[in-house]
Image: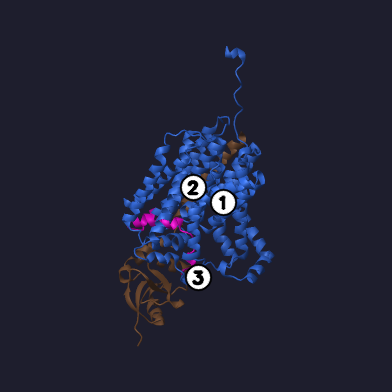
Chain colours: A blue, B brown
Amino acid sequence: MTGLLAFLVPLVAGWGLVRAALVRHRIRPPWAARVFEAALGAGAGIAISSVAFFLLTLAGAALLADILLLDTALLAAAVFAFWPTRRRAATGPAQSATTPLFRWNWVLALALAAGSALVLYGLVSVSAANTYGEWDAWSIWNLRAKFLAASGDAWRAALSPLPDKAGMHPDYPLLLSGFVAMVWKASGDTAPWVPQLTGFLFLALVAASLTSALTALRGLTSALSAGLVLLSSTSFLFLATMQYADLPLSFYCLASIVLLLFAEPALSGAFASFAAWTKNEGLAFAVLLALAILAVEWRAAGLRSALDRSRRFLTGAAPVLLLVVCFKLFLAPASDPLFQKGAAGLAHKLMDPSRYAQIAKAMIVDLYHFGQPWSHPLLLLAILALALRFRIDATQVRALRASSIALALAFAAYCGVYLVTPSDLAWHLRTSLPRLYGQLWPSVLLLVFLTLNVPGDAPPPKPTSRARK
Amino acid sequence: MAGIGIVAALAVYGALDYAQFLSEYSRSADQFQIAAQEARFHDALAALPARGIVGYVSDVPPGDVQGQAMLGAAQYALAPRVVVPLNNGAKADSAIGSFARPEEAPRVAAEHGLAIVSDYGNGVVVFRKEPRR
């Protein structure tokens, strides 16, 4: 019971905090606003509680009573933030797509619901059969959660510098392991339902935030179409059963970009910092997004505007980013052999053309396996692009440009890591590339659907003067 | 709007196809039998210290995939104890053995100067370091 409470309270508290933060926005339709706030809020709640639990652990004060106190404080903060805003009228720009109603939306919704039910049943079957998740779940993420959830100073093993624990990657950030450990510590056991449910929760959060944001920005038909393409991204969907941090990372990257589109740079920065607390790739994403915002704003609106927007982004990111930097510098220095190789070895690899060819081939093969052949997400996107053509909302150009640059640079950084990896390249590509695609995929989908034209019937004819009489 | 209709139809077809794949895959999803390891090591927990470093020995070399999986499964089942292979020079008063062929346990014990404390009959053996003579 206490475990369930420790799982649910951060989600509810996060919802209250995010709702209060977004109160000035007129997100339409109202159901999309509620789904959007709930999805982002749940993700924020998980991140904040994970950070708070880790700080309690560092302070030696992560007992059950402390966790319940933390939950109470989170709820109180949410009520304190939300209560004064509950009747405040939204004053910000409207976030509602003014698109004609597409009369076949009900068919799309039915297809999405039926397809989602089928796939969800299959994913739950896999998770039930593979309770402890895939390799990295029990050798990295949940193992570290077990250490963090243990009594006394056993948590230190989660950051253990022992050479035999290099495979545990003690320098990886702790958002997922911290949240799971907090619930385990509250429940008094290490039941596998916690990481299992967390995986499926993040899949739901990705789907909910993608579709609700697109409903507000581009209309329901775009949102349903994006949902159908996401449903076809089978390699991405499978992440829910693996219990890895790639799915949470994909959510925080998506949320950060969505909030940039909603002109909320501080909140966008906060979610980018949550991505940094999730995985090393998230730290790269946060830095690249900050740089992309600065560059795009500078070019479009001048240095003053760029500095102002960057300042707001960094203000939101600073608290958790500071924790990540301290974690990296003082608590769990990088143990990855990638960071311990000399420049000569790296240069040799960078000059080797066969590595480029091997990486390119693996990228094509894994992209092909990202979905089923006849319903491949790229095929579906190509059909939609042919049918709808392209249109970009002028008000979203800068945010789109900054997000696209950040994602492209993040992907380039992934490629760079493959080029110089000290591990066997074939093994490294085989075990990580599909997950790297998954990390960026929801954000890519969002950006693609924001550049596609909006489907819809022709608007109804204006009534004639005779009809008015 | 035929394009959107085609996308919807393909997506549902793909979902059906993928659900069938997942149904088949679920029959062999836990390929390293991690769920079974919790039960396999359960009885050994009481014979080991509650925390700290525990040595690890096995008849399967830790370099191959099966050896890594056996070590990883032992580590997960025994956490928060830190399980470290003894052949890497780790110092520990107690050790856990995970054997594919349980009859190898005495030989491995002799190699590492260990005495058998409990043999649970399922390939799991608890050892203690033999005092130096």
A380 on left or right of B37:
right
x, y percentage for residue A262?
Answer: 54, 41
Left or right, residue A379 beside residue A144:
right
* Mark 2–mark 3 distance (CA, rounded to whole Å): 33 Å
Q: Quadrant of residue A96?
A: top right
Tell me, yes or no, if residue B33 can be seen here.
Answer: no
Q: Secondary structure at mark 2?
A: helix
Amino acid type at mark 3: Asp
* Residue corresponding to mark 3: B64
- Say if labels 2 and 3 share a chain: yes
Question: In the rendered view, does A382 fall on the left or right side of B124?
Answer: right
Name of the residue lying farthest toward the front: A304
**Three-letter residue code for mark 1:** Leu
| Labels 1 and 2 within one chain | no
2 vs 3, front mark? 3
In the foreground, A27 or A466 = A27
**In which quadrant of the rendered image does the C terminus of chain A lie?**
top right
Q: Residue furthest bottom?
A: B133
Residue type, label 2: Ala
* Residue A204 within the segment the image draws in magenta: no
| Marked residue nearer the N-terminal end (2 or 3) | 2
Give me the disc on residue A440.
1
Q: Which residues are magenta?
A: A165-193
Q: Is residue A182 magenta?
A: yes
Q: Secondary structure at mark 3?
A: loop
Same subunit, tags 3 and 1: no
Chain on which label 1 sits: A
Q: Which residue is mark 2?
A: B19
